[in-house]
Image (cartoon, helix red, strand yellow):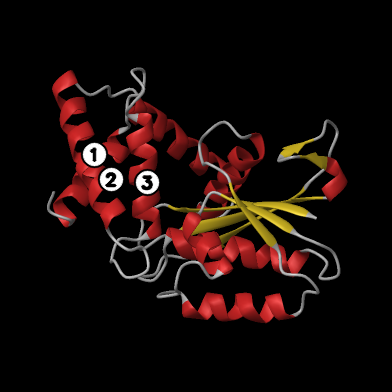
Amino acid sequence: MVAFTDGACLKNPGGPAGWSAILLAAQAITGSVAREGAVPIECYGYIPQAPTTTNNRAEITAVLAVLCIAAADYPLKIYSDSEYTIKVAQGTYQMKANADLWALYRMLLARRKVAPLFEWVRGHAGHDLNERADELAGIGAWNGDKNAYRKWQESSALEAHNVPSSAELLALRQQVQKLNSLFGSLDPQTSRVSAQERQFIEDMAKRLQKSNFNPTLKQSNWVKGLAAKYKV
């Protein structure tokens, strides 16, 4: 069995959030691409607003859903764009939060004959199954209200058209470079930099190297927020 998971949080932290999972038979997929005519199992869910609701919890919940659905007797491979979820599940990162969900993960893991394999896939990079999982997680965050989800997507698309000036892009690149250097110098196991923050800055550093990349307002604001948070 092969699965693609994702999580979405409309306000991180605080929520609401959504999770999604797409499952296919192993023979219905080549590499990480579904074969023509493959019929997946698609599911998603809603996580209400709460101070503890985060994107990471949504990502973990998606993995838990897969472990509940996929037969425990067969091998399982899970694709996720959450480095945090994969690294904690594999034991590479030390668990520092979401202990309740990771306890459920260990319980479900104990029921399987073989531990699942994880593979990271870059989010928002045109991967069909990851994009579909992203869409389903967004619908989940809107509690299944597809019209509300589409309006939210349209408003996000409008933000993408707000092209920053050359001076703003230069300042953003400098902030990202400083953050990337800082994060790279810190031990992931002991620093207070989250895996999500680290991955976001790594992705932004790569994207900003392309001359045709224009960051959205949300991306720019997140960079500015991190620059202020870590005083760079």
Give the residue number, with chain letter if any, for mark 3.
200
Disc 1 residue type? Gln
Tell me the residue at 55%/60% (across/down).
86
Lower sequence index among marks 3 and 1: 1
> What's the distance in space between the residues labelled 3 and 1, CA to CA?
12 Å
Give the x, y percent position of residue 71. 83, 66
From the viewer's perspective, is the residue at label 2 or at label 3 nearer? 2
Give the x, y percent position of residue 163. 27, 22
Disc 2 residue type? Asn
Give the x, y percent position of residue 113. 81, 74
Give the x, y percent position of residue 40. 79, 46
Is 62 drawn above or below residue 210 in the view shown? below
Query: Which structural element holds mark 1?
Result: helix
Tell me the residue at 54%/71% (across/down).
91
Disc 3 residue type? Phe
Tell me the residue at 77%/70% (across/down).
114
Please indicate whether residue 20 sits to the left or right of residue 160 in the image: right
Badge 3 density bin: few <14, some 14–19, many ≥20, Cα 10 Å: some
Residues marked 1 and 2 touching at CB (< 8 Å):
yes
For the N terminus, the image quarter is bottom right
Which of the 4 quarters of the picture holds residue 217? top left
Which labelled disc corresponds to residue 180? 2
Q: Exactly how many numbered labels are in the figure?
A: 3
Query: Which structural element holds mark 3?
Result: helix
Which of the 4 quarters of the picture holds residue 172? top left
Badge 2 density bin: few <14, some 14–19, many ≥20, Cα 10 Å: many
Lower sequence index among marks 2 and 3: 2
Which labelled disc corresponds to residue 177? 1
From the viewer's perspective, is the residue at label 3 or at label 1 nearer? 1
Residues marked 3 and 1 touching at CB (< 8 Å):
no
